[in-house]
Image (cartoon, grey):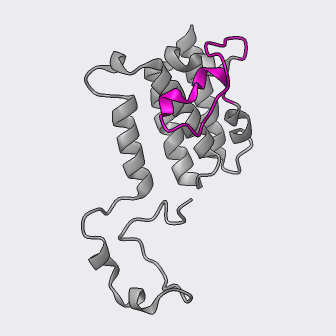
Amino acid sequence: MNPDLELSAKSLRLRDPDGNDDEALLPQQAKHKINVQTTTVLLLRSLSSVLLPPQNLRSVPPLRLAAFAKQLLTISLQLPEKSCLAMMGLLQQVAKVQGKKIAALWYTEERKGDGVFNPLREEVEGSNPFATTIWEGELLRHHFCPQVRESIVALEKGVVASRS
């Protein structure tokens, strides 16, 4: 994982004592002229445009939604606090808009997929997401940050509400 995940080009940084001295002499602004946003913000923007397109919400296939929901929840276990909260916010929006398509991931009795879930497939949609369940929510309920704990409960409530 990138240790600068939540830092932008304008973030203040101390010089690395073990790093390359030539790199330390260059000003930070000269290296990053184009993008001043964090990696997490860029990731969330691109994912929201794929999972929640502004024009045609029905065009997003359930396999894509389920695969990304599973991958994002797995990633959320390793993310820093602010990035994890941002991922939970995106997943709450997906559950609010497309909850019926991904609700089967939260229920063990409903299996739409046969076979084994393979998160390492090159195509996210080919990972067979409906052969697995969302177990990451149980771990995120014990997260050190209270906002993350509240957001996973809200996400699961949104999925349950969309189902009925």
Whether residue 95 is visible, yes or no, is: no
Figure check: 6 above or below 142: below
Residue at point 56% right, 15% down?
A: 161
Residue in the foreground of this view, choosing between 124 and 89: 124
Residue that sits furthest to the top in the current view: 164
Residue at point 45% right, 92% down?
A: 21
Relative to 160, 101 lies left or right: left
> Is 50 within the magenta?
no
Residue at point 37% right, 28% down?
A: 52
Using the rendered view, name the quadrant where residue 160 is placed. Answer: top right
Whether residue 131 is visible, yes or no, is: yes
Relative to 37, 16 lies left or right: right
Residue in the foreground of this view, choosing between 62 and 125: 125
User: Which quarter of the rendering shows the N terminus?
Assistant: bottom right
Using the rendered view, name the quadrant where residue 128 is placed. Answer: top right
Q: Position of residue 157 (x, y in %)?
A: 61, 23
Secondary structure predominantly adopted by residues drawn in magenta = loop
Residue at point 33% right, 35% down?
A: 49
Q: Which residues are magenta?
A: 108-134
Figure check: 19 above or below 12: below
Residue in the foreground of this view, choosing between 53 and 144: 53
> Is 114 within the magenta?
yes
Q: Position of residue 91 (x, y in %)?
A: 50, 33
Q: Position of residue 18 (x, y in %)?
A: 56, 88
Q: Position of residue 76 (x, y in %)?
A: 59, 45
User: Which quarter of the rendering shows the C terminus?
Assistant: top right
